[in-house]
Amino acid sequence: MSTDPIQSAALFERAQRVIPGGVNSPVRAFRAVGGTPRFISRAEGAYLYDADGRRYIDYIGSWGPMILGHGHPAVLEAVCRAAADGLSFGAPTEREVELAEEILKLVPSMEQVRLVSSGTEAAMSAIRLARGATGRPMLIKFEGCYHGHADALLVKAGSGLATFGNPTSAGVPPEVVQHTLVLEYNNVEQLEEAFALHGSDLACVMIEPIAGNMNFVRASLPFMRRLRELCTEHGALLVFDEVMTGFRVGLASAQGLYAAAIPGFRPDLSVFGKVIGGGMPLAAFGGPRAVMQHLAPVGAVYQAGTLSGNPVATACGLATLRELQKPGFFEELSRKTRLLVDGLAGAARDAGVPLAVDCEGGMFGFFLAESLPQNYATVMATDRERFNRFFHGMLERGVYLAPALYEAGFVSAAHSDADLAATVDAAREALRAG
Ligand SMILES: *Cc1c(COP(=O)(O)O)cnc(C)c1O
């Protein structure tokens, strides 16, 4: 249908000589779907432009942060002003306090917050804090959830609940993951068993409340309710990794949704990233004062960062969070996302292709399957060949979806109804073509 992306192909060649795999983060290389990754030269509103001058409607949004769309004027102005005042001081600034206050105002489960530079760093630090605060070594994570690439989290399930996980990356010695237990998402029975066996050694359970790293899978209410009860009963901290869902599924984040459905619900610690940086390197973790006081310099749990709370990144994050709080922001964003997924479901019906969809706020998922998966194994059993054809069919038609079937999608405030309608038309064509 379309010609090859000549400039992107040339840049990819050049990149592979000097950067492993030609990319600075693996999923960008298109390994899951094949083909040439597009090198992006600029972005504006809902669109990406590649090195060959082609325009794409962007449903990645830098993997979540660009909730306002690219180049939002208020954000750009805040960034330029902050940059003119200095790029980094290595000393505290008023804006860090402002951003912390802003985040705490929106997340009632947290009384204090520490700013860092990446989601990986925030998740890793939250685990160290949980271990330091409880004096316990073990943690539970769930298969299909991603919490960044800290050693202790690069692990898959072992052969049973009494055994610990195996590293999923070379360079992680088995001893480093020997305290990490990996369970199936949404499996209440396994959770009960794991707590019965290890409850008194558990520092924390870390979870993506809506798992965006296996496309879009919600933790069921019974599962979340039981998880909260078990953590409380056994004195383990419940850690919500909201790096993706935070200020993306709603102003109150995913924890707000669970709190609305389960009376009195709140996580013990929360991890944020992506949207709170608005596209700059910024992330955070926080919780009750009593727990956060275990952090250096007041407490014994060490954690630090040269660029933590960077003045330009905090300006970008603050400007972004302020836009999200304008009246009706999430109502309008949710309406658009719903319009998109309903459109995709309709297009699939027209083409006679099974497609299950879900969304919340500005985040969505779609599966080439009859029904919504509840765990990682079911996600990975959806039609991969068809997904890959669909991905490329959409890319050729100017729609940039995440290049792997286990990634979530994102709609921004800059997407117009016309963009969404064009996307649905492209999907109908792509699905009909096979
Ligand atoms: C992206 C992501 C991370 C890692 O954040 P980085 O900034 O890429 O290090 C952690 N947890 C979740 C849920 C994420 O989506």
Image (cartoon, grey):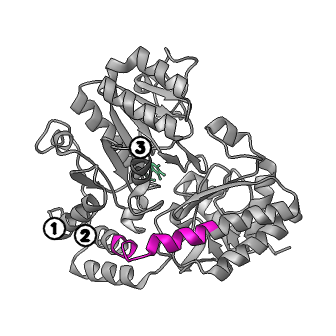
Residue 344, compared with residue 284, is above or below; it is: below
CB of mark 1 within 8 Å of CB of mark 2? Answer: yes
* Residue at which label 2 appears: 311
Q: Which residues are magenta?
A: 321-338
Residue named by callout 1: 93
Classify mark 2: residues with Cα within 10 Å, few (<14), some (14-19) or many (20+). Answer: many
- Residue positioned 41% across, 46% down in the render: 241
Quadrant location of residue 324?
Answer: bottom left
Q: Which residue is mark 3?
A: 262
The amino acid type found where label 1 is placed reads Thr
> Which residue is at 42% across, 21% downward?
195
N-term mark: 3 or 2: 3
Q: Which quarter of the figure has residue 19?
A: bottom right
Identity, as a three-letter code, of the amino acid under mark 2? Pro
Q: Residue 357 appears at what percent x and percent y?
A: 68, 56
Cα–Cα span, label 3 and label 2: 38 Å
Front one among 353 and 399:
353
Q: Callout 3 environment at 10 Å: few (<14), some (14 to 19), or many (20+)?
A: some
- The kind of secondary structure element at disc 1 is loop
